[in-house]
Image (cartoon, helix red, strand yellow):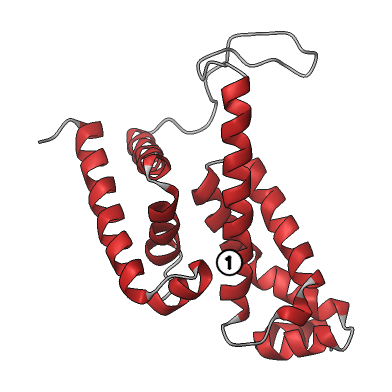
Amino acid sequence: MSGAVHKTAGDEELVAACRRGDASAFEGLVLRHQRMLFNVALRMTGSREDAADMVQDAFIAAWKRLGEFRGEARFSTWVTAIVVNLSRNRIQQNSIREKRVAYSLNAPLPDCDGEIHPDPPGTGPTALEQLEEAELRQMVQQCIDKLEQGFREVLVLRDMQELSYEEVGTALQLREGTVKSRLFRARDAVKECLRRAVGTS
């Protein structure tokens, strides 16, 4: 199967080609879904480095476990579930690590030589609108980070990745009613968090 065909083939066709030993077909799946999975992992963990690692690990796991994929859900939903599980594990690992190592978020950063210097201001655009947009995104992410893990997962998959309720339920192994209930509570918690963050009643 050529690269051009990979772009037009559906996931089911690419999975079938993978099972026949076509590694380039799996590369097509990676290229198609890696950005979406990165966004999921990033929203779950808040770390670009962790997110990149987990997407790579998820595709390695998917390749090894392709025989377990029965096609009962979409491939994207199946591999999203793998990313969610990896995110849970990474969050737990980071939590344990943070309890062992005290650090300050405001501490100056070491340079490549290990020397400490004050963190210089960014040299990028400083337009007020861009700053406000960045601050709002940061506030939203901080509010998402404060959610209990189960609520965060539902919010990220449904509202940010726009998976259907059924797909979210499949990825998280939850009933649709539970997905809707958690989503309602997660949205409410984020709204309340944002209200407090901007100082409105």
Q: How many marks?
A: 1
Which quadrant is home to the N terminus?
bottom right
Q: Position of residue 194 (x, y in %)?
A: 25, 40
Q: Residue sitting at 65 percent across and 64 percent down?
A: 34
- Please say if 183 is above or below 18: above
Q: Is residue 190 visible?
A: yes
Q: Residue sitting at 52 percent across and 42 percent down?
A: 46
Check disc 1: other Cα within 10 Å, few if <14, some if 14-19, many if 20+. Answer: many
Regarding mark 1 in the picture, which secondary structure is present there? helix
Looking at the image, residue 87 sits to the left or right of residue 57; the answer is: left
Q: Residue furthest right?
A: 21
Q: Residue sitting at 31 percent across and 73 percent down?
A: 177
Q: Position of residue 104 (x, y in %)?
A: 53, 15
Q: Nearer the viewer, residue 34 or 192?
A: 192
The quarter of the picture where residue 24 lies is bottom right
Which quadrant is home to the C terminus?
top left
Looking at the image, residue 72 sits to the left or right of residue 128; the answer is: right
Tell me which amino acid carries mark 1: Ala
Q: Residue sitting at 78 percent across and 81 percent down?
A: 67
Q: Residue furthest left?
A: 201
Q: Which residue is mark 1?
A: 81
Q: Position of residue 47 (x, y in %)?
A: 58, 41
Q: Is residue 2 visible?
A: no
- Please say if 174 is above or below 120: below
Q: Position of residue 26 (x, y in %)?
A: 78, 76
The quarter of the picture where residue 18 lies is bottom right
Q: Nearer the viewer, residue 38 or 146?
A: 146
